[in-house]
Image: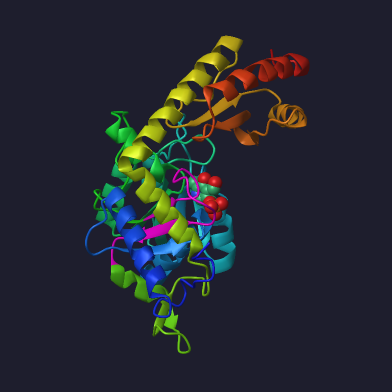
Amino acid sequence: MRFLETNLGDPELCPGTKEIESRYIAFISQLLHAPKTSAGQIVSGGTEGNITAMWIAKQLSGKKEILLPTSAHFSFQKIASLMDMKLVEVPVTKEYVMDVSQLKKKIRKTTAAVVGLAGSTELGTIDPIPELSEICSDEHIFLHVDAAFGGFVIPFLKKLHYKVPDFDFLLKGVCSISIDSHKMGYAAIPLGTLMIRKKQWLGSISVDSPYISSEKQAGMLGTRSGAPVAAAYAVSQYLGFEGYKQMVQSCMDITQYAERRIGKLGLSLVLKPTMNVIGVKLKKPSLMVKKLSEQGWRVNKVERLSCIRLVLMPQITKQIIDEFIPVLQKTCEEVGEL
Ligand SMILES: Cc1ncc(COP(=O)(O)O)c(C=O)c1O
């Protein structure tokens, strides 16, 4: 509440907010192994994080083509339209991750950036970021990692000894990472961070800002409240890395429990879950979503994968799964899925 009226866009006028912002960015830097040369830009979420990253890539390269997997988030459609950039889709493998051999074939002199996903929207899959990093660093191409969902999951899966690929700044080819606190960071909306490997890149998206206290302003937005940063910082201090690790552990426990219960009904999953996202294969996902929603259960459909998507966020308990499964079973029987 105390931070609602502060302005992140005018840092010299609100030095306390600026201080909280830099402390929060230091927390995210540590999480993502960002080097000393790096900088963080607070954004409103994954969309603005992706827009800002592609804006930097376009400015630095002077080029306009983005290579991205077919699984990429729809925010890239906005980027293409807003910044007159061209999206070149790279097919995914049967594991639903970017096909690296296809990527190699599509790289051209006009490529401005490659985008890899660390936690796809639909299934939570992770692209082979170590390979993308090698390729992009050899070819001198800007590599952006969209970790809007997975950024607060993968580091802790690693600590919990799950087998997941590296995805952060430890990989030399990774130029930027977008990570959302308002998703698995358990913070209030709207808050994400775009981390970039080199602070000076902010210069490419800065303009003179003569009437406010700082000389230049980087990024898309001007005036914006300091409250979401203060809230996210409070959560980060309350939970700490250990708290996040426990939360991810409990999300994975619930995911595995849900997976077993769904399997016992005779339904199958699109893939073995990488993180706390489950795709349940169905013949009529739209009808199922409609019927479930009429009974108060809101799940998403993924038409192109013919599945419904369950995201097992930290507030989803075993008891909720126990209530959901009989409803899912009954609805599947009514619709002819079972
Ligand atoms: C991988 C990914 N990137 C970007 C976004 C966009 O995030 P936001 O809605 O916070 O702008 C999402 C949202 O679900 C996402 O899953």
Question: Could you tell me which residue is drawn at 54 percent across and 37 percent down?
Answer: 122
Q: Quadrant of residue 269?
A: top right
- Colouring scheme applied when the structure was drawn: rainbow
Furthest toward the left, the residue is 36
Q: Inspect this view and state whether residue 199 appears.
A: yes
Which quadrant holds the C terminus? top right
Q: Position of residue 242 (x, y in %)?
A: 31, 38
Camera-side residue: 255 or 226?
Answer: 226
Q: Quadrant of residue 139?
A: bottom left
Furthest toward the front, the residue is 2
Q: Inspect this view and state whether residue 72 appears.
A: no
Q: Position of residue 279 (x, y in %)?
A: 55, 28
Q: Which residues are magenta?
A: 177-198
Q: Position of residue 9 (x, y in %)?
A: 47, 74
171 left or right of 207? left
Q: Quadrant of residue 306?
A: top right
Magenta stretch: residue 188 in it?
yes
Question: Could you tell me which residue is drawn at 69 percent across and 30 percent down?
Answer: 297
297 left or right of 262? right
Q: Is residue 318 above or below residue 152?
A: above
Question: Could you tell me which residue is drawn at 42 percent across and 75 percent down?
Answer: 14
Magenta stretch: residue 117 in it?
no
Task: Say how many tags the image has.
Answer: 0
Q: Position of residue 115 (x, y in %)?
A: 42, 51
Q: Is residue 156 above or below residue 6?
A: above
Camera-side residue: 67 or 49?
Answer: 49
